[in-house]
Image (cartoon, grey):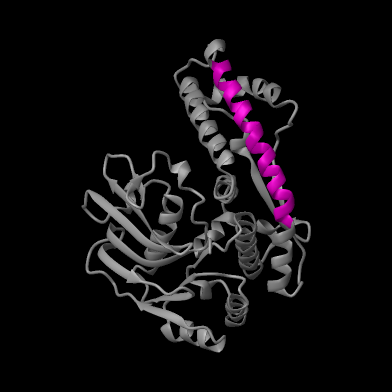
Amino acid sequence: MKEWTLQSLELLNFKSYPHANFDFGARINCIVGPNGAGKTNVLDAIYYLSTGKSYFQSSDAPNIHHQQQQMSIQGLYAHDGEEERIHIGLEKGQRKKIYRNDELYKRLADHVGLIPVVMISPSDRDLIAEGGEVRRRFIDATLSQTDPVYFDHLLQYHQALKQRNTMLRNGMGKDNSLREIYDHQLVEHGLEIFKRRRAFSQTFAEDVAKHYEAISNGAETVTFAYATKIEEDHYAEQLKEALPKDLVMEYTTFGIHKDDLKLSMDGRLIKRYGSQGQQKTYLIALKLAQYHYLHQVKGFRPILLLDDIFDKLDAERVHRMIDRVNQGVFGQIFITDTHPERAQAIAEAEGVEANIIHVERQNQPV
């Protein structure tokens, strides 16, 4: 069996936890406790083990527990009849280290995609409410878990972009010989990213529409589209045409790092015209489509993390999701909730045995 099932988790100086151990079941795990008890932090640790980074923080240092110098996250998995141990260690001022069975990875790219994961969280509302950077992170996170070539192009593109922007800030933008080196790298890697994003979006859009219809009973029609100004045969020329503006702004104003996703309902942007309920439903559809995509490409079911799912869906729709667990649509699931009886009732109603884990507020600063 190719699926990865998390059996246990050990945290040391991670966010609100000075030290904690958790044991999990193979199907549904309900992490329950009052607000502020650290339920979401457990899910973020699981996400960290899969992707090498936090779902909620763009940098690593803020995840280290108050006034400590290092943190550790360690997970024991069942995979293909064997036990596998993933360990992430971070010390302030040092490079993050990720180990698989005590063997240190040389590159993060060698780990990303090994254990596919999907998180559904209240913070996902930023996918609709905020700017294009959040939506680019969504498409990058999805493709990076399935396409190591894409991830490599993405890393190299952003390295070249960082160097070009530094050159522009330092007033060296008119140095054609140096700038053209970076321009060539941006076009080379940018075109590969562009092609993969375009192909992904064309197939992914169908799944988003299908899942939205299933959740909303066909109340509206939604679309998902890749929004870019890149012209495949003229990318290099477009980059050159933007140079005068780049010199004034002192950063690179054109490229795939400006791409966006157009999320619409009945032909209008859901950000502007969708109700709160419609936006929540769209986000769930988006994440279920992500789960389905990872499942199809990887050939096995990802781990699903549902943070405060009752804040997003009514009980009836949560029932539908758990029923799909029974049908084998989902594999291992982690759910956080403030009410243990609510999570237990959902599981019992569907005839699924749930592992209930109680967490309490830590008597430590976060």
From where the camera sits, is residue 37 visible? no
Residue 196: tell me if it is visible.
Answer: yes
Q: Percent position (x, y) of residue 198?
A: 71, 43
Q: Main secondary structure of the magenta part?
A: helix
Left or right of 108 on screen, residue 235? right
Answer left or right for 299 relative to 238. Answer: left
Q: Nearer the viewer, residue 347 or 267?
A: 347
Image point 61% across, 63% down: which residue? 283
Quadrant position of the C terminus in the picture: bottom left
Report the magenta residues as a range: 179-205
Identity of the residue drawn at 50% across and 60% down: 123
Compared with 116, 325 (above or below) is below
Q: Position of residue 200 (x, y in %)?
A: 68, 48
Q: Indicate whether 301 appears above or below 246.
A: below
- 198 inside magenta stretch: yes
| Residue 330 position within the rendered picture, expressed as x and y whole percent measured from the top left | 58, 70
Residue 87, x across and y down, in percent: 34, 53
Residue at figure coordinates x 46%, y 85% from the top left: 344
Quarter where residue 239 is shown: top right
Q: Residue at x 42, y 50 (%)?
A: 53
Closest to the observer, 216 or 7:
7
